[in-house]
Amino acid sequence: MTELKTKEEPSNISDSHIPGKEKLQIPYAVLCELTHRCPLSCPYCSNPVELEIKSREIDTETWKRALSEAVKIGILQAHFSGGEPTARKDLEEIVQHASSIGLYTNLITSGVLINENRLKKLYDCGLDHVQVSIQDTDPENSNKIAGFKGHDKKIHTAGLIRKVGLPLTINAVMHRQNLHNLDKMIDLAVKLDAERLEVAQVQYYGWALKNQTAFLPTKEQLDRATEIVEEARIKLKGILAIDYVVPDYYAKRPKSCMGGWGRQFLNITPAGKVLPCHAAESLSFLKFDNIKDKPLSWIWENSEAFNKFRGTSWMPEPCKSCDRKEVDWGGCRCQAYALTGDPYATDPTCEKSPYRKVLDKVIDGKLMPFSFEFKTNQGNEIRKMIGLIMVEELRKVGIAADVHTMEWSVYLDNVRDHKFDAMILGWVFAVDSPDPYQVFHSSQAVGRGSNSVSFKNDRADKISEMNRKEFDADKRIALMLEFQEILHEEQPYTFLVCSKSHLVHHKRFKGINIYPFRPGYDLKEWWVPSAIQKYSK
């Protein structure tokens, strides 16, 4: 497998990213995520994995101020999404304000929480357009995908939208579970008198990345879908406009993500964080400024997050010398980070990317079933049972796995030779003064060393070497905290199971901390207050 490394983040933005050094584009659209609340639970949802709760949502006046600031920097369109934006009781007031200051307004909704009366109110407030998501033409499958029995309500809402005089777009998120009904989806959009149909293939970030196996279509499915769309565009010219988004994994070149990082779009989260795109929070190392704290114009022009990948100066080779670098702008940073661990890496969807094999390993030109094998040693019934439990749990979500038990020496040979998909072992670390050298130092990845996942990171190596020579406890703690941050970012191990242990102690004892590794506690930390001590020296 291609070795993946995460670059150290530079402390300063390059001169070419400083406003005035590189001419900024005027953004023309803002995506307003009014809330993450939603009755649906689509497993490909573009919402972040970690949702914002209602109490953190910015209030009406803050949204109105943000929209006014958007107009001042040249933005023309405001798209109201979620979650489900109609869960906000102040939606009408926000829409009315946006319309009054000259913004084109678009409501992106599931359509299950709205009625005719509210649609009329929104129309009177100046709403210009509505986009409704439909998961499938088959009601049963549609409800299954959405995790909510709302298909019939969606169809009814689409009719109401046209009844009150609002333009309608149908957003059909297509994937392996519904692509066979694409022709019917096109027919449905025509029947509902939609002006536009978005055939939006699932893009694999967030929830979609976690559930990729269930949704990535085969190459054959995609080729047939492309034919259907091309035929429909000719047949329905002047009747229905069809936007067609191909899943990146089958592309030869990356898409121009959001028209380029920090070039045309910005996104405001329910809590007020301002992002270059809706998936940007997956880049966990970035700090996103908040509309509550700073003007939108300052964030657009000066914030570290927006300048991080703006323009071309950040690009590695082969992007830097590519004749398409100002066409696709290096592709998607979120996708590069998700697939390689390096946000600067050439997007693996590009055929010129050195990481293309990472993508090919995932699909290999067709859908590759997600399956793997647990290896463990004979004679340990607990480990065998853990393996069987994991196999059953994975089966419930469509992942095939099995358990292969082997003689201890053979098992160890498999581990040392890196011949495993997943292994069942027990981790033992000293609670006091841990030493990661044997497990994580790159020297131990050579031959049959104890670094069994071939983890290599120059900074991690340096830290483990310094840790062995440092006698100051506070300095060792600081080194290990930095080491843990590296492990968090690069994730050389993915722990699928952690066994629980029970610790019984008398209530007199204080200072008892539970650790996620054996033995799970450190006796040197325990103490009993003098007043209730029973024994003395």
Image (cartoon, grey):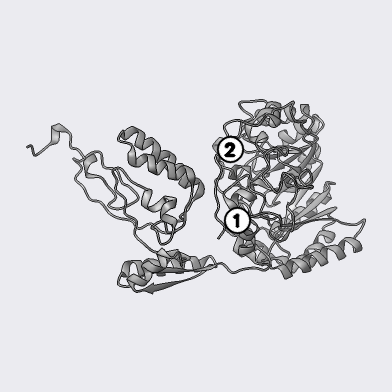
Q: CA distance from mark 2 to mark 1?
A: 20 Å
Q: Residue at x 27, y 47 (%)?
A: 521
Q: Quadrant of the C terminus?
A: top left
Q: Splitting the image into 4 quarters, where does residue 415 fall?
A: bottom left
**Residue 290 position (above or below residue 464):** above
Image coords of residue 25 (percent x, y): 78, 34
> Please, what secondary structure does the residue beneath circle 1 have?
helix
Q: Quadrant of the N terminus?
A: bottom right
> Residue at label 1?
209
Q: With 117 as the anchor, is 446 left or right in this view? A: left
Front in this rendered view, residue 404 or 77 = 404
Q: Which mark is residue 286?
A: 2
Q: Splitting the image into 4 quarters, where does residue 386 fall?
A: bottom left
Lower sequence index among marks 2 and 1 = 1
Q: Amino acid at mark 1?
A: Leu
Front of the two marks 2 and 1? 2
> Please, what secondary structure does the residue beneath circle 2 have?
loop
Image coords of residue 372 (percent x, y): 50, 68
Image coords of residue 390 (percent x, y): 43, 65
Q: With 523 as the anchor, is 78 left or right in this view? A: right
Residue 292 visible to the viewer: yes
**Residue 357 position (above or below residue 60):** below
Q: Residue at x 33, y 70 (%)?
A: 408
Q: Residue at x 41, y 70 (%)?
A: 388
Q: With 512 as the anchor, is 212 left or right in this view? A: right
Q: Residues within 10 Å of mark 1 (few under 14, many from 20)?
A: many
Front in this rendered view, residue 221 or 155 = 221
Residue 144 visible to the viewer: no
Image coords of residue 97 (percent x, y): 75, 31
